[in-house]
C-alpha cells in the first residue's frame, strides 16, 4: 500500500524547532583534522498536529541547526490524533530502531525518552506511553517514530476502508 503524501506548506504554521542531537564529526585529512557538526532537528506545530524532522551539517553548530530546520520544514507530515492522545497502539520501525507508541488516559503526560519525547511534544500529543526498542541511535529512533505516526488511522478512514459507517465500528 503506497501512501501519497501531499506537500504541506511550512509558512502557514507556527512551527517550533527542537534540537534532538548534535554530533561533532572529525575528518582526518593530509593537513590535520577537519571538524564539522551534524544536527538532528524536529519542528512541529502542536496546535495543528504537524511535525517534521531534518538533518543539517556545517562547520559550526548554529549553521548546522539552521540547515536542519530548513530540511525539517521540507518533509512535514500531518498526524491523526484524538483530543490529547493517539487513536491506537502502533509499532514503528526504521533500521534497527523500533518505537512503540501506546495511547494513554488523560493526565498521564508524555512518557518517552529524549528523541521520541521531542517528536511527541512537537506534534502536540499530551498523553502517550512510548518505548524505544533496539537501536538507541537518535536518527533511527526519530525515523521509527515518524514511521509509527504515519501508520496512525482515524475512525473515518478505517470506516471507509472497511466499507462501513463510523457508528458501526
Image: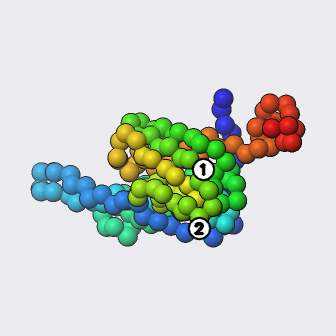
Residue at the extreme left of the image, as rendered: 31
Q: Position of residue 42 (x, y in %)?
A: 49, 59
**Which quadrant is home to the C terminus?**
top right
Question: Which residue is the site of mark 2?
Answer: 15
User: What residue appears at the point 49 percent right and 50 percent down from the top-left corner?
Assistant: 130
Using the rendered view, name the quadrant where residue 33 is placed: bottom left
Tell which circle, 1 or 2, labels the residue nearer the N-terminal end.
2
Q: Real-space Cα distance between discs 1 and 2?
A: 24 Å
User: What residue appears at the point 59 percent right and 42 percent down from the top-left corner?
Assistant: 89
* Neighbourhood count class around disc 2 (C-alpha, 10 Å): few under 14, some 14–19, many 20 upward: many
Task: Judge from the rendering whether residue 140 lies leftward or rightward of residue 45; answer left or right.
Answer: left
Residue 71 seen:
no
Q: Is residue 103 above or below residue 73?
A: above
User: What residue appears at the point 22 percent right and 60 percent down from the top-left corner?
Assistant: 35
Task: Judge from the rendering whether residue 80 lies leftward or rightward of residue 31; answer left or right.
Answer: right
Q: Position of residue 63 (x, y in %)?
A: 39, 67
- Number of dots carrying numbers: 2
Question: Mark on residue 103?
Answer: 1
* Neighbourhood count class around disc 1 (C-alpha, 10 Å): few under 14, some 14–19, many 20 upward: many
Residue 99 seen:
yes
**Which quadrant is home to the N terminus?**
top right
In front of the other: 8 or 29 = 8
Q: Position of residue 87 (x, y in %)?
A: 67, 48
Amino acid at each position: 500500500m503506497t501512501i501519497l503524501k501531499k506537500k504541506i506548506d511550512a509558512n502557514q504554521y507556527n512551527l517550533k524547532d527542537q534540537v534532538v542531537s548534535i554530533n561533532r564529526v572529525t575528518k582526518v585529512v593530509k593537513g590535520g583534522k577537519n571538524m564539522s557538526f551534524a544536527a538532528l532537528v524536529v519542528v512541529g506545530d502542536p496546535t495543528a498536529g504537524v511535525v517534521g524532522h531534518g538533518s543539517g551539517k556545517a562547520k559550526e553548530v548554529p549553521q548546522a541547526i539552521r540547515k536542519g530546520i530548513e530540511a525539517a520544514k521540507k518533509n512535514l507530515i500531518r498526524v491523526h490524533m484524538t483530543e490529547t492522545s493517539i487513536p491506537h497502539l502502533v509499532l514503528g520501525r526504521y533500521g534497527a530502531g523500533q518505537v512503540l507508541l501506546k495511547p494513554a488516559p488523560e493526565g498521564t503526560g508524555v512518557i518517552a525518552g529524549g528523541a521520541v519525547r521531542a517528536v511527541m511534544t512537537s506534534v502536540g500529543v499530551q498523553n502517550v506511553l512510548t518505548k524505544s526498542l533496539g537501536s538507541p541511535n537518535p536518527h533511527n529512533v526519530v525515523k521509527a517514530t515518524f514511521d509509527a505516526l504515519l501508520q496512525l488511522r482515524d475512525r473515518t478512514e478505517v470506516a471507509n476502508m472497511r466499507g462501513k459507517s463510523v457508528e458501526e465500528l
